[in-house]
Image: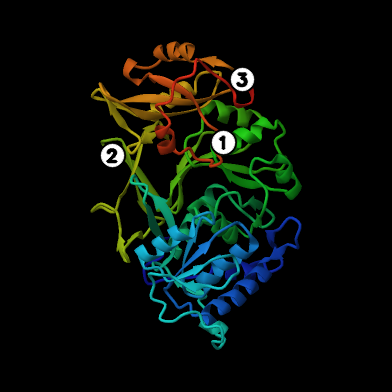
């Protein structure tokens, strides 16, 4: 049952420390593990320190969120101090953090995990940090949270590329975890790899899911490192398509995995089939920041369910709409809140989809669509066709400016064997309308980021087309 606006909710970390005080909470390779009671004690100490430094209830604290134990203490200490948390990418330049804080009137920044806070340029701290302020009592901390009060923010980029702050209540996080854990149960003894960034809603969702179920968090390592997964006894992990591809390339699936949750975009059917043939328990998911992570999941047997506390439908234009108890509180804009929903409370995702029997098929994004000679081109449609070619590992299609047609499609392709571009073009003409066939093919560059950045590829789309596409390790010198 969704909590009412007047309800208060218990701190999940405090509840876990009471229910499972001696159970391992944080597995830290190379260090001593922490149980739930120890984690909660450190959070209380840190929260008292933040209060002594001047952090007050309802104020925003921006933290550079890596995946260290110190950050996991900071996250819940900010909440226990009664403040609001905004985790950001540690690689974000300081000038951009300053601009963000000024634009949204954010109060405090924490330059490094476990460090002292400093006042932001746009906040209302009332005072600078107080190095000799009297210590606060534990009773001054927040052990319960009003259900609808904003507690966290997550940066999300819109079509303009300008970051927006999507805000969530404690109820959003709790209901998100409840629905996810009913689909894929988490219990004491389970071990979830903290494989997603904590400045993304998916990373925060892992924390709340483990606290609700009493499962352990495994820090360090990578989701595609089978040896690390086996050595740390990981039972659950979240990953994107690229990581799954790397894991399969090693050819030795780790034992003991109960669930692999795949998100961050579509996964090629051929890759999913290969994973399941190796016995990997892959669950597909569809989610978004504005719904506090997952909306629906597809089990290894193909069953699809909209998770509890969520609603999902496709409108007459093919756009996916969502609402429910996990729907965010809105975007923070210049210190005010924009709920970003229609009159019936639906959030328009700008994702395109269609219900196929009992499954939701994601067909693309409105933001990616472009017009070529009067014809609408959905890049994902061309990419799906390319992914059917046996030598294509991955493909991304972007628009390129054209004097006659306005825009034409260009495909960036990663291959597993040398492939002539004219041969690929002829093969594609048998499967797509002429206007959808790319006018050029380019090698898809290796990217450190697991998500493809279409805007960066579009800037490279006018380069001369090679005659042959090569695998990355076979490019002629």
Characterize the local packing of mark 2: few (<14), some (14-19) or many (20 or more) Cα atoms within 10 angstroms. Answer: few
Left or right side of 150 for 133: right
Disc number lying in front (1 or 3): 3
Q: Which residue is mark 1?
A: 242
Left or right side of 91 for 19: right
Check disc 3 and report its element: helix, strand or loop: loop
Characterize the local packing of mark 3: few (<14), some (14-19) or many (20 or more) Cα atoms within 10 angstroms. Answer: few
Disc number lying in front (1 or 2): 1
Q: Which residue is mark 3?
A: 476
Q: Earlier in the sequence, mark 2 or mark 3?
A: 2
Residue 43 drawn above or below residue 68 = below
Check disc 2 and report its element: helix, strand or loop: loop
Looking at the rendered image, the quarter that the C terminus falls into is top right
Q: Are marks 1 and 2 in contact (CB under 8 Å)?
A: no
Q: Are marks 1 and 3 in contact (CB under 8 Å)?
A: no
Label 2, label 3: how many angstroms apart (C-alpha)?
Answer: 49 Å
Q: At x 64% / y 25%, what residue is drawn?
A: 473
Residue 13 drawn above or below residue 465 = below
Q: Which residue is mark 2?
A: 315
* Residue 397 in view here: yes
Label 1, label 2: how many angstroms apart (C-alpha)?
Answer: 31 Å
Disc number lying in front (2 or 3): 3
Judged from this view, the residue extending furthest toward the front is: 477
Q: Position of residue 34 (x, y in %)?
A: 70, 65
């Amino acid at each position: 049952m969704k909590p009412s606006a007047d309800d208060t909710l218990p701190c999940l970390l405090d509840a876990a420390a009471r229910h499972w005080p001696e159970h391992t909470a944080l597995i830290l390779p190379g260090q001593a593990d922490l149980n739930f009671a120890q984690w909660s004690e450190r959070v209380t100490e840190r929260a008292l320190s933040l209060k002594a430094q001047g952090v007050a209830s309802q104020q925003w604290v921006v933290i550079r969120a890596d995946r260290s134990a110190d950050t996991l203490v900071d996250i819940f200490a900010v909440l226990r101090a009664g403040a609001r948390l905004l985790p950001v990418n540690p690689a974000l330049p300081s000038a951009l953090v300053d601009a963000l804080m000024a634009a949204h009137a954010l109060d405090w920044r924490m330059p490094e995990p476990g460090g002292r806070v400093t006042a932001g340029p746009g906040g209302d701290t009332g005072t600078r940090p107080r190095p000799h302020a009297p210590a606060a009592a534990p009773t001054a901390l927040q052990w319960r949270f009003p259900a609808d009060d904003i507690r966290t923010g997550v940066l999300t980029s819109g079509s303009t590329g300008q970051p927006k702050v999507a805000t969530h209540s404690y109820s959003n996080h709790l209901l998100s975890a409840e629905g996810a854990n009913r689909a894929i149960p988490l219990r004491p003894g389970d071990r979830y790899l903290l494989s997603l960034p904590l400045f993304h809603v998916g990373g925060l969702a892992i924390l709340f899911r483990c606290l609700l179920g009493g499962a352990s968090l495994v820090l360090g390592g990578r989701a595609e490192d089978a040896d690390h997964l086996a050595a740390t006894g990981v039972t659950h992990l979240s990953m994107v398509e690229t990581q799954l591809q790397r894991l399969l390339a090693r050819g030795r699936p780790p034992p003991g995995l109960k669930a692999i949750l795949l998100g961050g975009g579509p996964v090629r059917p051929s890759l999913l089939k290969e994973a399941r043939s190796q016995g990997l328990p892959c669950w597909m998911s569809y989610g978004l920041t504005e719904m506090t992570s997952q909306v629906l999941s597809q089990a290894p047997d193909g069953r699809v369910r909209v998770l509890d506390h969520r609603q999902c439908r496709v409108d007459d234009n093919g756009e996916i709409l969502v609402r429910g108890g996990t729907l965010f509180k809105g975007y923070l804009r210049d210190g005010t809140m924009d709920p970003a929903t229609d009159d019936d409370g639906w959030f328009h995702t700008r994702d395109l989809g269609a219900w196929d029997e009992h499954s939701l098929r994601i067909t693309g994004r409105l933001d990616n669509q472009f017009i070529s000679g009067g014809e609408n081109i959905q890049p994902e449609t061309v990419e799906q066709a390319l992914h059917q070619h046996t030598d294509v590992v991955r493909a991304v299609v972007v628009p390129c400016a054209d004097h006659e047609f306005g825009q034409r499609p260009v495909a960036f392709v990663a291959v597993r064997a040398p492939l002539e571009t004219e041969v690929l073009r002829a093969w594609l003409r048998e499967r797509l309308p002429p206007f959808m066939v790319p006018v050029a093919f380019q090698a898809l560059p290796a990217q450190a980021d697991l998500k493809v950045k279409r805007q960066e590829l579009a800037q490279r789309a006018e380069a001369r087309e090679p005659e042959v596409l090569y695998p990355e390790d076979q490019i002629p010198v």
